[in-house]
Image: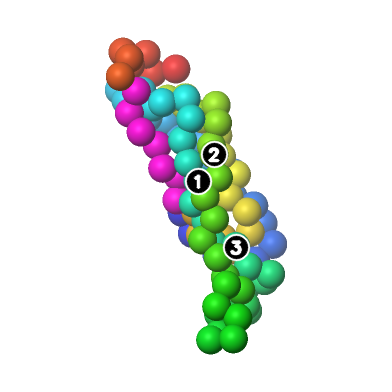
């Protein structure tokens, strides 16, 4: 998800109909001081890729994407039966 808005969070609801995710996932996002930040040879980590745990994942879940962000939600399928909830 790419949120291009400079000031507003994008609140979403995901519905994974017929697919039961594991309760824990991962969110991967770019982190920087602001949207004009750039990496340079002298400061190659001004913009970083960050991975964090995403907990409480269900077949229906809400997630808020911060302003001006790029985020990947990495969800894996559960081995259990799908309930849709």
Q: Which residue is mark 1?
A: 27
Q: Are marks 2 and 1 in contact (CB under 8 Å)?
A: yes
Q: Which mark is residue 31?
A: 3
Label 2 belongs to which residue?
53
Q: Is residue 37 a member of the stretch shown in magenta?
A: no
Q: Secondary structure at mark 2?
A: strand
Question: Is residue 64 or residue 46 the one in the foreground?
Answer: 46
- Give the camera-side residue of 74 and 35: 74
**Residues in magenta, as a range:** 72-78
Q: Could you tell me which secondary element the residue under label 1 belongs to?
A: strand
**Up-down relation of residue 2 to residue 21 (above or below):** below
Residue at the far front: name it. Answer: 42
Query: Marks 3 and 1, how far apart in space?
Result: 12 Å
Which residue appears at 53% of the width and 86% of the height?
41
Q: Quadrant of residue 44?
A: bottom right
Q: Is residue 11 left or right of residue 80?
A: right
């Amino acid at each position: 998800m790419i949120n291009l808005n400079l000031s507003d969070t994008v609140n979403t609801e995901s519905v994974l109909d017929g697919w039961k995710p594991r309760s824990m996932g991962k969110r991967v996002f770019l982190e920087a001081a602001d949207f004009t930040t750039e990496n340079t040879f002298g400061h190659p980590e001004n913009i970083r890729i960050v991975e964090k745990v995403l907990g409480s994942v269900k077949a229906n879940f809400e997630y808020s994407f911060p302003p001006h962000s790029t985020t990947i939600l990495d969800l894996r399928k559960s081995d259990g039966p799908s309930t849709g909830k």
